[in-house]
Image: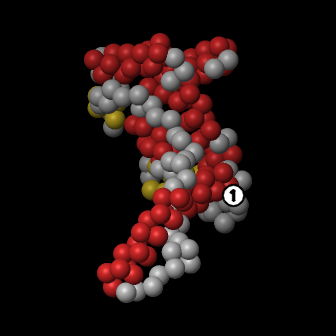
Amino acid sequence: MDNAANNDTAMAVFARILQEEHEFDLDPIAHHICCFPHIINICVQHLINGYKSADFSGLPRTWGNPPRVLHKKEYIMAVQEDPIRRGRETVRCVRSSGQCRRNFQQTIESGNANQSFMKGGVPFPLPVVQLLHDVMTHWDSTYYMINRLRALDQVCDHHHSVLTSKCFAAGN
């Protein structure tokens, strides 16, 4: 949602209040305040869209701390496969119908009941929640989508091939 008109109105009211209460002249057009979240959203979208074609030549061959060491070649291949697009596809498939959402939820519930999900070799119950769509006009929604995918990665990994094959076969 573009709230530039709201910003214009707010600046006009602010200028009037300054004039009436403090006899201070302020040109609301010259001092227009841009919508900060909108600017952040534009920046974030440019970063996301440009990341898969970024120049990674300056990266070392490996980095990180054992046991989690990243290898440059594998990292670049993963980035070039557009993980955000893949995440969006996974969310779209899981949320494509009420039945898909119920199946996803039932998988979480049964996995928790059977202690199927692990973290550090210990049974770890997952939150019984749905995946989140990202919305182009909400700059932080991609962040929330990725975090939810990460929180439910064991469920997503378990269902990914089944979900995507069913989803694409159905044309959703």
- Left or right side of 112 for 91: right
Q: Position of residue 160 (x, y in %)?
A: 55, 24
Quadrant of residue 108 within the rendered picture: top left
Q: Amino acid at mark 1?
A: Ala
Q: Label 1, on which residue?
A: 54
Q: Position of residue 95 (x, y in %)?
A: 50, 24
Q: How many marks?
A: 1
Residue lying farthest front? 20
Work out whether residue 165 or residue 89 is closer to the camera in this orientation and state it: 89
Q: Residue at x 61, y 63 (%)?
A: 60
Quadrant where the C terminus sits is: top right
Work out whether residue 15 or residue 84 is closer to the camera in this orientation and state it: 15
Q: Position of residue 62 (x, y in %)?
A: 58, 57
- Left or right side of 153 for 74: right
Q: Tell me if I can see residue 107 in this picture.
A: no
Work out whether residue 135 or residue 92 is closer to the camera in this orientation and state it: 135
Residue 41's place in the image compared with 134, above or below, is below
Q: Residue at x 45, y 56 (%)?
A: 65
Please tell me how crowded label 1 is: few (under 14), some (14-19), or many (20+) other residues with Cα within 10 Å.
few
Q: Position of residue 143 (x, y in %)?
A: 47, 47
Q: How is the image coloured?
A: secondary structure
- SS class, disc 1: loop
Q: Tell me if I can see residue 141 in this picture.
A: yes
Q: Residue at x 60, y 22 (%)?
A: 164
Q: Residue at x 50, y 35 (%)?
A: 133
